[in-house]
Image (cartoon, rainbow, N blue to C red):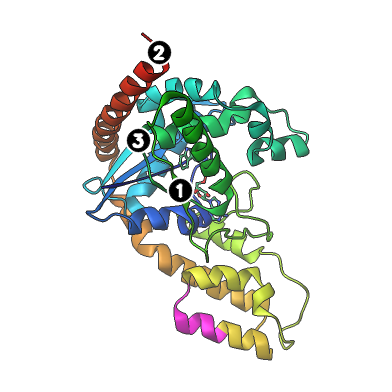
């Protein structure tokens, strides 16, 4: 069986449509009998930024509920919390001792924080090593992610090679799975959609809030009758993800010929977004807290068993008697 693993950081109250089209849609589509699927919430990673107990707890439960609402099925996937498998932090330590400082200094999350003059903590610097531990401890082959995580999966691969070189063949070399068309979903300002840039549209956000965000998508100042290039429009890029084919075609044609203003196009985008996510938004309301607790309790047991087996071998191989 092919082990497929991925995770999301609960650093906001909701996942956004970039998370969905870049990563979560792949998780759902990969639920097939020939795959062993493991999907978790990276709450240890979230601690690098979230400093409130309530916020971390609320975000975690909300995103877990969203996992189920999007279509992750606990019968087909092991769904769990990163912190229910504390063995990953032990593996992270062992991998830390193989990770060159230079490799981590070149990692995006840390480099971006430095470039923006933010004060980085050691957790943020070490973020890719904990992520490598997440991936390697389950012997994952494929890691479905958006493009922004490609470098992190490559670091995991590097560290697996280093470990195998020093201590003997132990880890499978993982590869990222990235969907070409949705590798980087743009946010309402045209930058990559991101929780930390606050430029996101949440799939489960209330209709009014979603409307406000979509109506504030950045555009140029071309008038209704003027021709517009669909390729340059954030509205069209997002519509291509959620819209029905005939609706996308109509908007693209009207943009090219002139005859549709940005305001109308945004209203169409809002309606199509709500329609696309309607079944998931409805399912969200039906998931109980009790159900979530039982899903993660089962998930933790399964995930932890695999992790403990790997760590037993790792401890023995590195000489921890
Ligand atoms: P996170 O929470 O930042 O993002 C979760 C997933 O969503 C994808 N993504 C996007 N894809 C396309 N367009 C966008 N605008 C966009 N924004 C986010 C991300 O690429 C990611 O796949 N480090 C990870 C969490 C993690 C992890 C792991 C992932 C921890 N350990 C092990 C895989 C394997 C993160 O912060 O994701």
Q: Which residue is mark 3?
A: 138
**Counting residues from the N terminus, which is met first, the one under dot 2 or under dot 3?**
3
Label 1 to label 2: alpha-carbon separation: 28 Å
Residue 72 versus residue 262 in the image, above or below: above
Residue 26's disc number? none
Residues tagged 1 and 2 counted as in contact (Cβ below 8 A): no
Residue 319's disc number? 2
Label 3 to label 1: alpha-carbon separation: 13 Å
**Counting residues from the N terminus, which is met first, the one under dot 3 or under dot 1?**
3
Describe residue 74's horizontal placement relative to residue 57 as left or right. Answer: left
Q: Which residue is mark 1?
A: 175
Main secondary structure found in the magenta portion = helix
Residue 138 versus residue 88 in the image, above or below: below
Please identify, in this view, whether the residue under mark 3 or under mark 1 is nearer the observer: 1
Describe residue 304's horizontal placement relative to residue 117 as left or right. Answer: left
The residue lying at 68 percent from left, 31 percent from top is 102
């Amino acid at each position: 069986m092919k082990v497929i693993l991925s995770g999301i950081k609960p650093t906001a109250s909701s996942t956004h449509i970039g998370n969905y089209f870049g990563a979560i849609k792949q998780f759902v589509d990969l639920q097939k009998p020939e795959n062993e699927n493991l999907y978790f919430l990276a709450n240890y990673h979230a601690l690098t930024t979230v400093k409130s107990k309530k916020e971390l707890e609320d975000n975690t439960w909300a995103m877990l509920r969203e996992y189920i609402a999007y279509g992750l099925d606990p019968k087909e996937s092991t769904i769990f919390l990163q912190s229910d498998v504390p063995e990953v932090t032990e593996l992270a330590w062992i991998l830390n001792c193989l990770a060159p400082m230079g490799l981590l200094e070149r990692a995006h999350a840390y480099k971006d924080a430095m470039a923006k003059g933010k004060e980085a903590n050691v957790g943020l610097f070490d973020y890719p090593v904990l992520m490598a531990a997440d991936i390697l401890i389950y012997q994952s082959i494929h890691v479905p992610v958006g493009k922004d995580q490609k470098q992190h999966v490559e670091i995991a691969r590097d560290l697996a090679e280093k470990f195998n070189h020093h201590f003997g063949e132990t880890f499978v070399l993982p590869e990222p799975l990235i969907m070409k068309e949705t590798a980087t979903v743009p946010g309402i300002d045209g930058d990559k959609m991101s929780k930390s840039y606050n430029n996101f549209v949440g799939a489960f956000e209330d209709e009014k809030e979603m409307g406000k965000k979509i109506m504030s998508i950045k555009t140029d100042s071309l008038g209704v009758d003027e021709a517009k290039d669909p390729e340059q429009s954030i509205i069209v890029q997002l519509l291509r993800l959620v819209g029905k084919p005939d609706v996308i075609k109509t908007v693209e044609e009207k943009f090219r010929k002139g005859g549709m203003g940005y305001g109308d196009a945004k209203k169409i985008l809002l309606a199509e977004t709500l329609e696309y996510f309607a079944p998931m938004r409805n399912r969200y309301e039906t998931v109980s807290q009790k159900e979530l607790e039982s899903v993660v309790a089962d998930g933790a047991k399964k995930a932890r068993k695999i992790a403990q087996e790997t760590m037993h071998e790792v401890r023995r191989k590195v000489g921890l008697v």
